[in-house]
Image: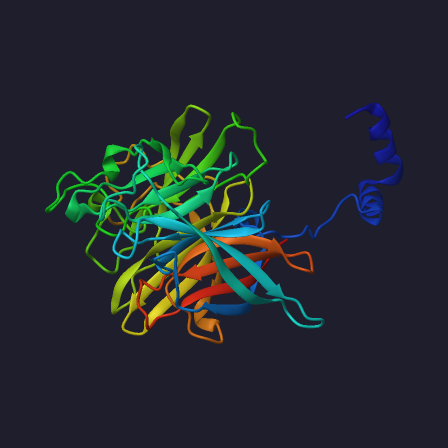
């Protein structure tokens, strides 16, 4: 401490000096307390505005159904919906849809109509539709280079492995496939000891950049996750949580590099559940925050919850052989409940697809969800409209 400061303290006294600083607001005994949880997550909330039921229909000799992924093309103001048809009701395909809002004064926005405008079949490298049973398309994202990234769960029983690939949006033809680590690939058709479990593979897909926001050669990031635990990660004890594997790819013009993998803590499976898992992911910022849909089907029908995820600080699990049981010393992805659809004023169905939609008249971001009716004529295809608030 300098002689000048010492002389000041001797003249006014320490107590009077601190009193003066307090009066100026330079010292405070009541600093605002911010919980670690609040620093970890974004202030996210949603309002459920409307539900629209798509009338049962066929379009160009295909049954419109099984919609398991949804993408909004902001530049073209169109929705793209991926059907998970394995070739039973038409070729593996996606639909282009138009969305019309009903905007009345002093009323929340509603969905006036969803209209099917085009269908495009997915084709292999030779330009042919995929053989029946070889593809189970479940996840989809629109890349910055205006191509479609699609994840297929595959079908273990028919020796069809899961894959992630890039498709031409206009023609539907595959352009390239991305390497999936061996730990995700079943090592046997019967009683495998590793890999995804049947129908519990890659259900989700999202990217961190919108079309037109990056150049053709500028890298961007792709994220996906398994719907449930891998064979080597699965624990039959229902009291122990299961951990899915969350993959983080870096995609460039001529590269697709898996740069990280994390453990996603799945909610405990409810009693009486027939199926339970993670059905969709959606990037909501550039800082590692996502929205995630968890869906359960059981004796009481469907139960769906919307979570916010924070991936910062999560352990890289790419070198961990098994995530079975309690994992000491491992930091999984953190999650926070945003909305429980049990609170909706109507029963929700099999929600699987989710995308950021158009801006609402009040300036907030819309969030659109779609349900997969599994080509059951007695079940609806629902489009849900929510208001998403961040901040």
* The one of 22 and 228 positioned closer to us in this rendering: 228
Kindly indicate the quadrant of the structure image that contains residue 169: top left
* The one of 222 and 193 positioned closer to us in this rendering: 222
At 35% from the left and 64% from the top, the residue drawn is 373
Does any portion of residue 204 appear in the rendered image? no
Image coordinates for residue 139, horizontal then vertical, percent: 38, 48
**In the current view of this chain or complex, which residue is farthest to the front?**
60
Image coordinates for residue 280, horizontal then vertical, percent: 41, 52
* The one of 328 and 355 positioned closer to us in this rendering: 355
* The one of 292 and 360 positioned closer to us in this rendering: 360
Name the quadrant of the N terminus.
top right
At 46% from the left and 56% from the top, the residue drawn is 307
Q: From the viewer's perspective, tell me whether residue 114 is left or right of residue 327.
A: right
**In the current view of this chain or complex, which residue is farthest to the left?**
190
Image colouring: rainbow
At 51% from the left and 62% from the top, the residue drawn is 114
Image coordinates for residue 327, horizontal then vertical, percent: 29, 45
**In the current view of this chain or complex, which residue is farthest to the right?**
11
Q: Is residue 198 above or below residue 55?
A: above
Image coordinates for residue 351, horizontal then vertical, percent: 40, 61
Q: From the viewer's perspective, tell me whether residue 54 is left or right of residue 88.
A: right
Does any portion of residue 164 appear in the rendered image? yes
């Amino acid at each position: 401490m300098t002689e000048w400061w010492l002389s000041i303290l001797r003249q006014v006294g320490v107590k009077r000096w601190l009193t003066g600083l307090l009066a100026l607001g330079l010292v405070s005994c009541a600093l605002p307390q911010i919980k670690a949880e609040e620093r970890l997550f974004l202030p996210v909330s949603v309002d459920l505005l409307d539900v629209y039921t798509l009338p049962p229909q066929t379009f160009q000799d295909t049954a419109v159904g099984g919609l398991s992924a949804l993408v909004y093309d902001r530049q073209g103001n169109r929705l793209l919906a991926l059907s998970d048809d394995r070739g039973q009701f038409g070729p593996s395909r996606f639909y282009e849809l138009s969305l019309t809002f009903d905007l009345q004064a002093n009323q929340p926005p509603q969905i006036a109509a969803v209209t099917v405008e085009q269908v495009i079949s997915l084709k292999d490298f030779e330009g042919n539709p995929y053989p029946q049973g070889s593809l189970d398309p479940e996840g989809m994202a629109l890349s910055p280079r205006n191509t479609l990234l699609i994840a297929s769960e595959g079908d273990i029983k028919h020796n069809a492995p899961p894959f992630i690939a890039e498709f031409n949006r206009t023609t539907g033809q595959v352009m390239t496939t991305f390497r999936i680590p061996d730990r995700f690939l079943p090592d046997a058709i019967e009683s495998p000891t590793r890999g995804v479990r049947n129908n519990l593979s890659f259900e989700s897909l999202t990217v961190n950049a919108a079309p037109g926001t990056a150049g053709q050669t500028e890298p961007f990031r792709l994220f996906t996750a398994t719907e449930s635990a891998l064979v080597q990660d699965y624990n039959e004890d229902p009291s122990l949580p299961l951990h899915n594997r969350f993959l983080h790819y870096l995609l460039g013009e001529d590269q697709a590099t898996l740069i990280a993998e994390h453990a996603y803590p799945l909610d405990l499976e409810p009693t009486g559940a027939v199926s339970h898992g993670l059905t969709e992911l959606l990037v909501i910022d550039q800082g590692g925050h996502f929205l995630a849909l968890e869906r359960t089907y059981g004796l009481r029908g469907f139960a769906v919850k919307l979570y916010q995820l924070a991936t910062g600080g999560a352990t890289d699990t790419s070198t961990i052989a098994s995530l079975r049981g309690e994992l000491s010393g491992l930091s999984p992805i953190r999650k926070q409940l945003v909305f429980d659809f049990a609170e909706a004023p109507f029963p929700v169905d099999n929600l699987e697809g989710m995308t950021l939609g158009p801006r609402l008249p009040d300036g907030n971001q819309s969030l659109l969800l779609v349900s997969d009716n599994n080509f059951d004529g007695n079940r609806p295809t629902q489009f849900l409209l929510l208001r998403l608030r961040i901040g």
